[in-house]
Image: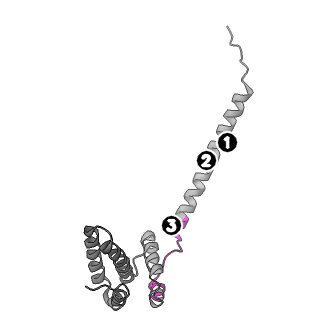
Amino acid sequence: MTKEKQKKDPKVMLLNLIIVVMIFVMIAVGVRMLFYLSYAKDHSTFMQDAGMMSFELGRNDYASLIAGKYYNEINGNEDARSYHAFADYVEALSMYKIYDQKGPAARAEDLKENMERARTEMGELTVFADRVDEMFDYRQ
């Protein structure tokens, strides 16, 4: 007894071919994505050094200073630690003023603790923290 060859449906063959091509495309895209992700991790340009953060502090550009702190945290750069502490202070103070007036008092107290911790870590930048206190009309 011999088996008869059954004729395959051309639609099924086409769908099988499309599935195989899609698998190869997905593998190629995945490999390329892994390459670019590892390249971006190794060659990140979104880091700010202490000089740039000092420039932003001199211009009273606190928003860029805070953004630079987050870029550095994401990329693992901890060189400008005192500037990071100052950015933490500014961010916590701005949020504290909001929660102190409108929000839950417990959250405001947590932010006040963050401000105190950041003030001890910022070192000689406490002079600038005093300016920020005046700007936000904050009295310790």
Give neighbour class at mark 2: few <14, some 14-19, many 20+ (Cα, 10 Å): few
Query: Which residue range is magenta in the image?
Result: 39-54
**Which residue is under mark 3?**
41
Tell me which numbered mark, 1 or 2, is placed earlier along the sequence.
1
Residue depicted at x 74% and y 27%: 10
What is the number of the mark on residue 85?
none
Q: Disc 2 residue type? A: Met
> Which residue is nearer to you in this view: 71 or 17?
71
Looking at the image, the residue that sits furthest to the top is 1
Tell me which numbered mark, 1 or 3, is placed earlier along the sequence.
1
Query: Which percent across, then down, holds residue 95?
Result: 36, 74
Q: Disc 3 residue type? A: Lys
**Which residue is under mark 2?**
26
Between the C-alphas of marks 1 and 2, the distance is 9 Å
> Which residue is nearer to you in this view: 97 or 116?
97
Query: Which percent across, then down, holds residue 100?
Result: 30, 74
Q: Disc 1 residue type? A: Val
> Which residue is nearer to you in this view: 42 or 54?
54
Query: In this rendering, would 10 be left or right of 99?
Result: right
In the depicted structure, whether residue 17 falls above or below residue 85:
above
Q: What element carries label 2?
A: helix
